[in-house]
Image: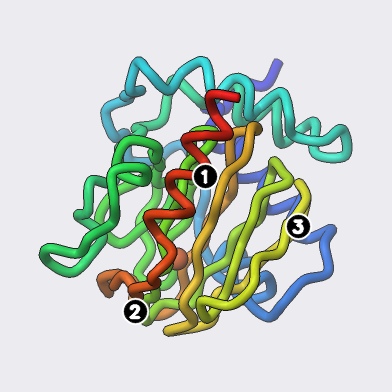
Amino acid sequence: MNSDPPVLNLIAEITSALSARQGPLIVEQTLSCLAEMDFTADSMLWPDPSMPDAFANDLDVAIKHIPPQLSSLASAIDASKHIVQWNRDLGQFYVKDADVGGSYRNGNMNCILIGSKNGFFHSDKLFMGLFFLRPYTFYRDHDHEASEMYFNLTGPHGFRFNVNGWSDYQADSIIWNAPWLPHATRVYNIPFLCLYAWIGNLDCLCRVVHADDWAQLEDELVTASTS
Ligand SMILES: [Fe+2]
């Protein structure tokens, strides 16, 4: 019987899934950071587990939407979901007074697996965890100095870059947000769940990149959620 902590198995499943995928440079960079690290129960840190009550059902729905080819990763997330520390970003990842919007503030949570300050394993090179958005959440255009990967585990969800046109990405797709590339996400009826990774300046703060259509996009999602 495997008695390893579930988070160790989760990191192993993430590594295996990423290794099996062709992707942009940041996939290779993430894998090489992971390869340098020592993942043993002895080197683990143990953040206090937490789960915002209102998110538990939607997280389960997201896990059920992870496609069959990622079923072992889905099982590993399911086994770890109450062990990790989920936190909502209320703007603390942003420069002071950034207008992230109520849709995002009320609709997001993330957990840190690897990081320079929190998480189960320490790294000054890689910040990695899970990022979740509830259905019909609008994540406004923003940018940051760190290079970012989203390994989308559910979908379709809408993305735009440089405040240009929207494209839908399916589950099991990988997005690379290069440093300072503005990006935004809109979530439809299926909750958004991704593996995120940051490489580069892990202490950088995000900035919102203003777009005139935020209110309209947020209203459209509210309307869609009630129809
Ligand atoms: Fe980002």
Give the percent coordinates (x, y) of residue 24. Answer: 72, 77
Return the disc, 2 or 3, that comes first in the chain's sequence.
Answer: 3
Amino acid type of the residue tagged 1 in the rendering: Glu
SS of the residue under disc 3? strand
Q: State how far apart marks 2 and 1 are (Cα).
A: 35 Å
| Secondary element at tag 1 | helix
- According to the image, label 3 marks what residue? 173
What percent of the width, then of the height, locates residue 189?
64, 32
* Residue at position x 80%, y 39% in the image: 70
Asked if labels 1 and 2 touch by Cβ distance under 8 angstroms, the answer is: no
Residue 92 sits above or below residue 72 on the image:
below
Q: What numbered label is drawn on residue 23? A: none
What is the distance, in whole Å, between disc 1 and disc 3 at their CAs? Answer: 25 Å
Q: Local crowd at mark 3 within 10 Å, few (<14), some, or many (≥20)?
A: some
Give the residue type that dot 3 points to. Ser
> Whole-percent x and y of residue 162?
52, 81
Quarter holding the C terminus is top right
Relative horizontal placement of residue 161, taking residue 213 as reference (left or right): right
Residue 201, numbered circle: 2
